[in-house]
Image: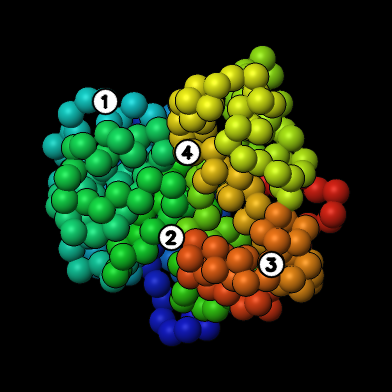
Amino acid sequence: MQSRGGGTRRVAILAFDGVTMIDVAGPADVFSHAARLGAAYEVTVVSPDGADVVTSTGLTLHVARAAAECGPVHTVLVPGAYGMVDRPFDAALVHAVGHLVQGAERVASVCTGSFLLAELGLLDGRRATTHWRQTDVFARRYRRVLVQPDAIYVRDGHILTSAGVSSGVDLSLAMVENDHGPTLAADVAEAMVVFMQRPGALSQFSAPSRRHVGRDDPLRPLLDAIAADPAGDYTVPSMAAVAAVSTRQLTRLFHDAVGTTPARYVETVRLENAQSLLQRGHTVGAAAAKSGFGSAETLRRVFTSRFGVSPSAYRDRPHPVPPSHAASPE
């Protein structure tokens, strides 16, 4: 099968014992759907020694071959695993990554897979991200990496790194879009019932993160209120009053529970709301007013700074749009 944008792209996904299942399955599904829609991708799952692996779910994942037997590939994808950064990396695993990336045109990681790239020095002097719970460890351990703590994914040259869990799907959709254009990427997202292709600069600390804050947490009523009415007046003192805590405690609670500042969280919720409105065809001015940015100029400035694209350009690109009553996917 000929690719819409050239020859077949071989994608090697490295699996190993304990690997997070969705870090492998999500990207594999994206490329497989793209292939069914006319893009020539060949996905191969490999392991350090060629043996099948037991994933984080306890399921056994069939592996095609050892990394050393994989041959030349276009794209290498390195997933993560729960707890993998808390112990020394297996030498065979690091060696497998090193072998795979030799000659690859594109290298990508999901979640803590970025630690393996950094271990080999591949991220020195580059911008990169990882799961938000591990960004502090990432920055301390690899001081030459320019850590982007809240990005969904980061592209720096031919290397892409992404945050945790579902961000592997966002990352893979971005690669498909880069290879074959936004229409095919949108078709893949629609087929997978992934309603929104999130730009890489979108914060990991999205509005749905409130789901991970307990109902009895003092932040929960505030996060629910912000999600319900992004255009509300959310100064730090007013938010502290809703949460019934001091402003200093509010800042600490946001850092501990959500991983960002109160102001950054509000901005992120507003940006997500603006994205949804733009996807449904609202003007930039209307999206700005409804999402709490006030003016079209303010939305343009913040939107372009975060996403690297203007609101109007984002609105005009193809998007699979969910029904108005659908919940935001995570």
Quarter-of-image position of residue 29: bottom right
Residue denoted by label 3: 295
Residue with the mark numbered 2: 43
**What number is the disc on residue 260?**
4
Question: Amino acid under label 1?
Answer: Asp
- The residue carrying pointer 1 sits among few (fewer than 14), some (14 to 19) or many (20 or more) residues within 10 Å by Cα, namely few
Lateral position of residue 97 relative to residue 273, left or right: left
Disc 4 residue type (three-letter): Thr
**Left or right side of 133 for 241:** right
Q: Which residue is drawn at 33% across and 39% down?
A: 135
Front disc: 2 or 4? 4
Disc ID at residue 29:
none
Which residue type does callout 2 highlight?
Answer: Val
Marks 4 & 1, CB-CB < 8 Å contact: no
Dot placed on the residue nearer the N-terminal end, 2 or 4 = 2
Q: Nearer the viewer, residue 262 or 178?
A: 262
- Where is residue 179? Give x, y as percent: 46, 76
Residue 76 vertical placement versus 52 (above, below): below
- State if disc 3 and disc 2 touch (CB < 8 Å): no
If you read the primary sequence from the N terminus, does the residue marked by circle 3 or circle 4 appear first?
Answer: 4
Which mark, residue 86?
1
Nearer mark to the viewer, of 3 and 1: 3
Q: Which of 62 and 211 is in front in this view?
A: 211
Q: At numbered mark 2, what does the secondary structure look like: helix, strand or loop?
A: strand
**Is mark 3 in CB contact (under 8 Å) with mark 4?**
no
Disc nearer the start of the sequence (1/2): 2
Helix, strand or loop at disc 3? Answer: loop
- Between label 4 and label 1, give the one nearer the viewer: 4
Query: Which residue shows up at 18% across the image and 59% down it?
Result: 125
Q: At which x and y percent is residue 306?
A: 49, 61
The answer for how far apart the CA atoms under marks 3 and 1 are is 46 Å
The CA distance from mark 4 to mark 1 is 23 Å
